[in-house]
Image (spheres, helix red, strand yellow):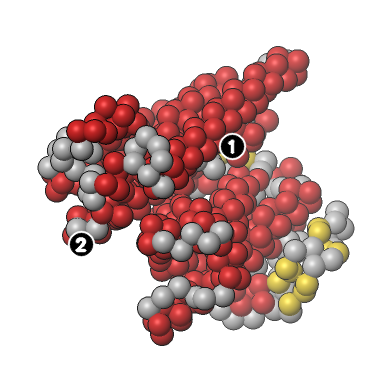
Amino acid sequence: MAFTLASHILLVPFGVALPAITLLMHYRGLRKGDAIALLLARRWSAVMAVQFAIGIVTGTVLSFEFGLLWPGMMGRWGDIFGFGFGIEAWAFFLEAIFIAIYLYGWRRLKPWTHFWLGLPLPLAALMGAFGVVAANAWMNTPRGFTLDASGRPRNVNVRQAVFTPMFGPEYWHFVVGVVLTAGYVVAGVYAVGLLRGRRDRYHRLGFTLPFTVAAILTPVQFVLGDSIARSVFQKQPVKFAATELVWKTDTHVPEYIFGRLHADGSVSGGIKIPQLDSILAGFRPATKVTGLTSVPASDRPTVIQATIVHWAFDIMVTVGSLLVLLALWYGWCWLRRRELPRSPWFLRCAALAGAACLLTVECGWITTEVGRQPWIVYQNMRVSEAVTGTRAASLWTMFGIVVVVYVLAFGSFLTVLAKMSHRWRLADEGAGAGAEDLQGGIPYGPRPLSTTASGDRGDE
């Protein structure tokens, strides 16, 4: 489950955010009559469709794993936990329909009609994120039910089960995070092109729009990250203790940047900053921070799990801080000269920003899931009660099959993207199928007769 989630989550930023970035570029193209912007939007929509197809495969595997690997959880909590995934399923079907309409509309619909028909696409993507985050937030702060004498949930209140105390902080942190991740990844592709000397307007615009979106959202995400950490401090104090390596409940608690927790509560390595953890948690040194020893050892993460969570959280904060500096660098140069920073180091950093964001997405998932251990439903069901009793040999066989499926899926994804990129490069040079994209100026209306046949094949 860890492998499949860690793999699938790499596609999530593009499934949720790429439609919005594509439509933003599409709007710019129509508003300004910009053929390059429309060409970029059209090509990004093709990438979006391929990504969605791969996401179907990886997401389907996950849906099977919930039933196969977690029968204890689904059997007891499925009526509540499954509601969020029901929302996600509806969003998935709607997104598939809107993607099909949007792809079909190029050259076949009037420009503004095509744009408005594509506008529900990012809304469907946000709806899918709503369902998944609602399910995860419920696992962290379960609400909206009572327990009968046998410990089974009764009297489910859907509103309370969806809008749990952690839902708001998790949802907005997630949405802003995936949008800026997609922005930095897309911009990074064009940053590499700019570094290779392709200084044409196509690469500049392909870099500038998604990077601007990501740069604007980066400080917002930093504030939201601080907010969600404070929500964890209030709602899941033991998880917060694991995240910050707090062993005993106390005031004037120091902050450790990286470091390793030991069984006796000591921390080795890292950088110790006196009192900072209490200040960050409650804005004053006298803030009391709950420690791991406030609950029995069986009800808290192990020292290894706490160290893993702590490192994941610190990596997120470190990368986020560096991205804020990168965004400020970009904003300062843009406000002064209305152009990109001239230093090649800026483009190198921008090219790496996308990969760094994907790393933080993984770290965020680790912090959320590992920090909750040993609970799968916080303070209501342990992982050991939820997991399947299937023999180890069967689990290893299943794991091997899943690895093969995912390797083939991601290999196919990268192969298709590489072929698309090569074809588009030839088209831009006027040497291959699809060159009519630039000849016509705007990708709407009839195509030149001499290239119609090959162009149809390229669109298909």
Residue 378 pos. (x, y %)? 57, 43
Residue 92 pos. (x, y %)? 35, 32
> Where, by quadrant of the figure, is residue 283 drawn?
bottom right
Compared to 356, does 323 lie above or below? below
Q: Residue at x 85, y 56 (%)?
A: 262
The N terminus lies in quadrant: top right
Residue 222 pos. (x, y %)? 51, 67
Whether residue 157 is visible to the viewer of this picture, yes or no, is no
> Where, by quadrant of the figure, is residue 253 drawn?
bottom right
- Local secondary structure at mark 1: helix
**Residue density around tag 2, few if under 14, some if 14–19, many if 20 or more, within 10 Å:** few
Camera-side residue: 453 or 303? 453
Q: Residue at x 43, y 29 (%)?
A: 53
- Local secondary structure at mark 2: helix
In the shown orientation, is residue 189 left or right of residue 375?
left
Residue 109 pos. (x, y %)? 15, 38
**Residue density around tag 1, few if under 14, some if 14–19, many if 20 or more, within 10 Å:** some
Label 2 close to label 1 by CB (< 8 Å): no
Camera-side residue: 288 or 389? 389
In the shown orientation, is residue 283 left or right of residue 249?
left
Residue 295 has which mark?
A: none
N-terminal of the pair, mark 2 or mark 1, is 1
Q: Residue at x 67, y 55 (%)?
A: 312
Compared to 368, does 76 lie above or below? above
**Disc 2 versus disc 1: nearer the observer:** 2
Residue 7 has which mark?
A: 1
The amino acid type, in three-letter code, at marker 1 is: Ser
User: Dot 2 corresponds to which residue?
Assistant: 32
> Where, by quadrant of the figure, is residue 412 drawn?
top right
Q: Residue at x 19, y 43 (%)?
A: 444
